[in-house]
Amino acid sequence: GNAIKFSPDNVYVDLHTHVVPDPQDETKSVIRFVVKDYGRGIDKSDFQKIFEPFQQASKETATIYGGTGLGLPITSKLIKRLGGTIHVNSEKGKWCEFVVDLPFVGQTVDVAELSRSLQDTTVVLVVPRPASDCPILKSFDDCGIKWKMV
């Protein structure tokens, strides 16, 4: 949500997932989620602060965008309870990237079964561009997943 909230209109937000070696133990794997936006960015001096409850990168952030300053602290605690990590990279004024690593237990996924189980699911997408430009929609259609764009 923050990636969309802090990005200008008509700008993409990148989301990538990969299974990669665990940086702390290369005999294990993690599922890595990377969310990158091309908005305001975060000053390096604020990297720790944004994970503290009721804190935001600046007073201007609260004034312009609102919010309570609880999203990242709650997210961080949930990730840690799942045995994972979260960290941020950013270039102020250009982009911000959050990287989440969660333990991967090595179980395979039956894609056909997963697709069948999602057929009665409706996905609501919040995207800053026309539906025809959203590549994930073809995947949803192929799997029989209903979607609505807002």
Image (cartoon, rainbow, N blue to C red):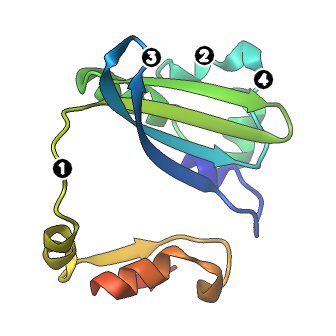
Between 36 and 77, which is closer to the camera in this rendering? 36
In the rendered view, does 67 fall on the left or right side of 33?
right
Which residue sits at x=44%, y=17%? Answer: 23
Q: Which mark is residue 108?
A: 1
Residue 23 image label: 3
Q: Earlier in the sequence, mark 4 or mark 3?
A: 3
Mark linked to residue 121: none
Disc 3 or disc 2, which is closer to the eye?
Answer: 3
Amino acid found under the numbered disc labelled 3: Pro
Instruction: Measure the alpha-carbon separation of dots 4 and 3.
Output: 25 Å
Q: Amino acid at mark 2?
A: Lys
Judge by depth and name the residue closer to the eye, 59 or 32.
32
Image quadrant where residue 139 sits:
bottom left
Disc 4 residue type? Asp
Q: Quadrant of residue 124?
A: bottom left
Give the residue number, with chain letter if any, for mark 2.
49
Marks 4 & 2, CB-CB < 8 Å contact? no
